[in-house]
Image (spheres, rainbow, N blue to C red):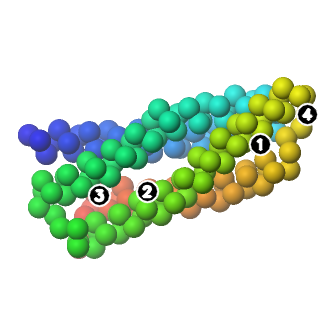
Amino acid sequence: MDYLIVKWLHVLSSTILFGTGVGSAFYMFMANRGKSPADIHFAARHVVLADWIFTTPAVIFQLFSGMYLMQLSGHKMSEQWIMSALALYGFAGACWIPVVWMQIKMRDMAAEAVATGTALPLRYWAYDRWWIVLGSLAFPAVAIIFWLMIAKPV
């Protein structure tokens, strides 16, 4: 019974993680394309909030529930699909951490632009480019993790 409950929670949290990531990326990307500091501030403020409320707990839970499921199911850390999934998890995390930092900075720059009635600084758009690059790298990594978890290839 423990296995089914933990597996359900693991799948649920992966859904929250992936869904929040895709949804947040979509709204931030679209707000940035519109170039309105007020719209960008609104989107960035809520993307940062969603990262703290949904993404961060899901990222943490994924690692611990995955390790517990591995133990419960008798899989070994040395299995190639598990090592690959963990490497991709680390890679996606290495992309996500600077993205979170940039989103906070972008939110703050947008808030200042709105408060002062000025345009967003060039640094904002440099962050936007890196945000897109890092997100574009992390997204397929997470999608491959989903496949590895389902297929468990040998």
Secondary element at image label 2: helix
Rendered image: mark on residue 118: 4
Marks 1 and 2, Cα distance to the nearest angstrom? 25 Å
> Would residue 85 be found to the left or right of residue 65 on screen?
right
Precedes in sequence: disc 3 or disc 4: 4
Q: Quadrant of residue 70?
A: bottom left
Looking at the rendered image, the disc whose residue lies closer to the viewer, 4 or 1, is: 4
Secondary element at image label 1: helix
Marks 3 and 1, Cα distance to the nearest angstrom? 35 Å
Which residue in the protein does label 3 denote? Answer: 149
Looking at the rendered image, the disc whose residue lies closer to the viewer, 3 or 4, is: 4
Identity of the residue drawn at 65% across and 43% down: 103
Q: Position of residue 35 (x, y in %)?
A: 82, 38
Identity of the residue drawn at 36% across and 55% down: 146
Precedes in sequence: disc 4 or disc 1: 1
Marks 4 and 1, Cα distance to the nearest angstrom? 17 Å
Marks 4 and 2, Cα distance to the nearest angstrom? 39 Å
What's under tag 2, amino acid-wise?
A: Ala
What's under tag 3, amino acid-wise?
A: Met
Q: Nearer the viewer, residue 122 or 17?
A: 122
Identity of the residue drawn at 28% across and 50% down: 64
Residue 56 in view in this figure: yes
The answer to whether mark 3 and mark 4 are in CB contact below 8 A is: no
> Would residue 133 be found to the left or right of residue 93 on screen?
right
Q: Residue furthest left?
A: 1
What's under tag 1, amino acid-wise?
A: Arg
Rendered image: mark on residue 143: 2
Secondary element at image label 4: loop
The answer to whether mark 4 and mark 1 are in CB contact below 8 A is: no
Q: Nearer the viewer, residue 45 or 27?
A: 45
Precedes in sequence: disc 2 or disc 3: 2
